[in-house]
Image (tube, rainbow, N blue to C red):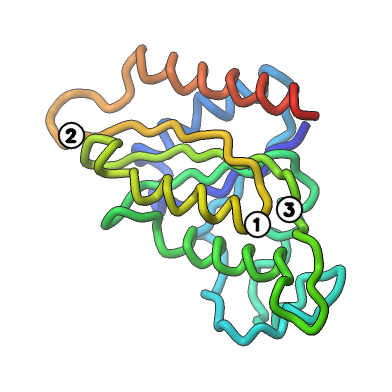
Amino acid sequence: MKYTILMGSPNRDGNTAALLRPFVEENQEMGIEQDVIWLYERDIKPCRGCKACQNAKDCLGCVQKDEFQPVFDSIQTSDVLVLATPIYSWFCTPPMKAVMDRLIYAGCKYYGAEKQPSAYWMKQVASITTCGYKPEYGADLWEEALKRWCKHGEMDYLGMYCRRDTGKKEEFMDEKTEFDVRDFAHALYITVGHSM
């Protein structure tokens, strides 16, 4: 089993990174292969909407010359895609959004001369998220968009683990949070294992 984890935070010492560490550790202990890609450290341009990719069969087909191809290739060889992002203004960070736009067009060639099946058919998707408000208000739009994105791409949305940072002096990572994120890793493993 292989996961591609797209990390949308610009901060390697931030809250989202703190949540991701025990998640990755737990996956390692379960024998899951993982490719963690830090998006802020890659040159990935936003989609230009030119639709050149739509008539390119069996390949990415994007006209832009950047570092998107390795991200696309990693996802193609994975069973699960995990989108890890802090929420900025009720949505994911800019590089995460750029990748999502590029992925949905490159992998879902529905708009060319000849419609092709989704490259992500039944791929599993989950999210690890941090936000400043209660999750039902701070991350609800992100989760709804993610569900629609998955539906359009014929992917199976598995759920989200979200932790709020109140900005107060209380510690963000505590024993309960670490237990919960490790439990989320186990739940994904069981769900994905049953679907394979």
Residue 130 figure quarter: top left
What's the residue at 74%, 33% (across, down)?
A: 33
Seen in the picture, residue 124 relative to 98 is either above or below; the reply is above
Which x, y percent locates residue 5? 60, 43
Closer to the observer: label 2 or label 3? 3
Residue 185 on image: x %, y %: 57, 24
Q: Find the residue positioned furthest to the left.
A: 168
Where is residue 86 shown, x and y percent of the image?
A: 37, 47
Query: Residue 153, labelled with which disc?
Result: 1
The amino acid pointed to by label 3 is Tyr
Please tell me the numbered disc located at residue 166. Answer: 2
Point out the image quarter for the N terminus. Answer: top right
Question: Would you say the residues marked 2 and 1 are in contact, meaning their CB atoms lie under 8 Å apart?
Answer: no
Query: Disc 2 to disc 1, how far (Cα)?
Result: 34 Å
Q: Is residue 45 left or right of residue 52?
A: left
Label 1, secondary structure: give it.
loop
Residue occupying the point 58% across, 40% down: 157
Please provide percent x and percent y for residue 109: 73, 71
Q: Is residue 140 above or below residue 39?
A: above
Residue bearing the label numbered 3: 120
Which of the two labelled residues, at mark 2 and mark 1, occupies the earlier sequence position?
Answer: 1
- Verify CB contact (< 8 Å) between mark 1 and mark 3: yes
Lower sequence index among marks 1 and 3: 3
The part of the image, by quadrant, that contains residue 153 is bottom right
Q: Is residue 25 above or below residue 138?
A: above
Q: Amino acid at mark 1?
A: Gly
